[in-house]
Amino acid sequence: MHAEISELIDIGRSLHSRGWLPASGGNLSARIGKDLVLITASGSHKGHLTREDFVVVDLHGNKVEGSKKPSAETLLHLLVYRNFPEVNSVLHVHSVNSTLISRLSKENVNLKDYELLKAFEGINTHETSIQVPVFENSQDMKELSRRIEERLREGRFYGFLLRSHGLYAWGKSIREAYIRLEAFEFLFECELRLILRA
């Protein structure tokens, strides 16, 4: 079996314990070859994952391995892998912070002048800003994937939000994706507290 499964099982348990993956929400994936992706199966509880809760798909979403059905949001993971060849993991959570800030923001969440922005590759100073695009949620995954893919081609992004849904973050490794996810969560909480004070 694939070595990445053990790491994703541990991360699923950790994210669930932090309240970022309630019920059967969210999904976790890792690239396991140039054109293959390991992803959690539909309906799997991320705090109690087993090896049987993973399937392997190609970059077009065709199941290659596994007995269960791939997550309904597999196409959203795959668009990241197709557009960013250096990415080897995508993590999607339904945290309170990411869900709330997606409801309070219009087209983007702008994160500016935070020291923790240095958690993102290529940023060496707090005197900078990044945008996190916010997309209207949809059950039409093909159309949603198309809209997101078009936007991601416009610039450098480290993640995106689905309104009333949650956050997608990625990295060159599972560990890097986890670190970026953690950074986003901290920054979103800071922004929410500023909004509540206003």
Image (spheres, rainbow, N blue to C red):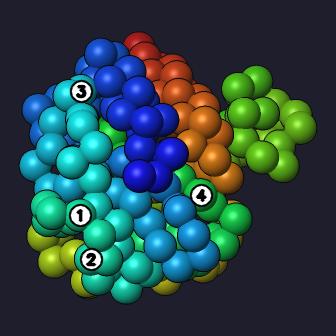
Q: Which residue is outermost to the front?
A: 1
Tell me the mark number nearer the camera, choosing from 1 and 3.
1
Q: Which mark is residue 88?
A: 4
For the residues labelled 2 and 4, the Cα–Cα distance comes to: 18 Å
Question: Compared to 186, does 82 lie above or below?
Answer: below
Residue visible at 53% across and 62% down in the picture: 31
The circle on residue 63 is 2
Q: Quadrant of residue 97?
A: top left
Residue type, label 2? Lys
Q: What amino acid type should be assigned to the residue bearing mark 3?
A: Gly
Q: Amino acid at mark 4?
A: Asn
Q: Would residue 123 be seen by someone viewing this image from the given angle?
A: yes
Residue denoted by label 1? 66
Residue position marked by numbered label 3 in the rendering: 47
CA distance separating discs 4 and 3: 22 Å
Q: Earlier in the sequence, mark 3 or mark 2?
A: 3
Q: CA distance from mark 3 to mark 2?
A: 23 Å
* Upstream in sequence: badge 1 or badge 4: 1
24 is higher (above) or lower (below) than 62: above
Q: Nearer the viewer, mark 1 or mark 4?
A: 1
Q: CA distance from mark 1 to mark 3?
A: 20 Å
Q: Pick whichever of labels 1 and 3 is earlier in the sequence.
A: 3
**What residue sits 54% from the left and 35% below the top?**
178
Disc 1 marks a residue whose amino acid type is Gly
Secondary element at tag 3: helix
Asked whether the beta carbons under mark 1 and mark 2 sit within 8 Å of each other, the answer is yes
* Mark 1 → mark 4, Cα distance in angstroms: 20 Å
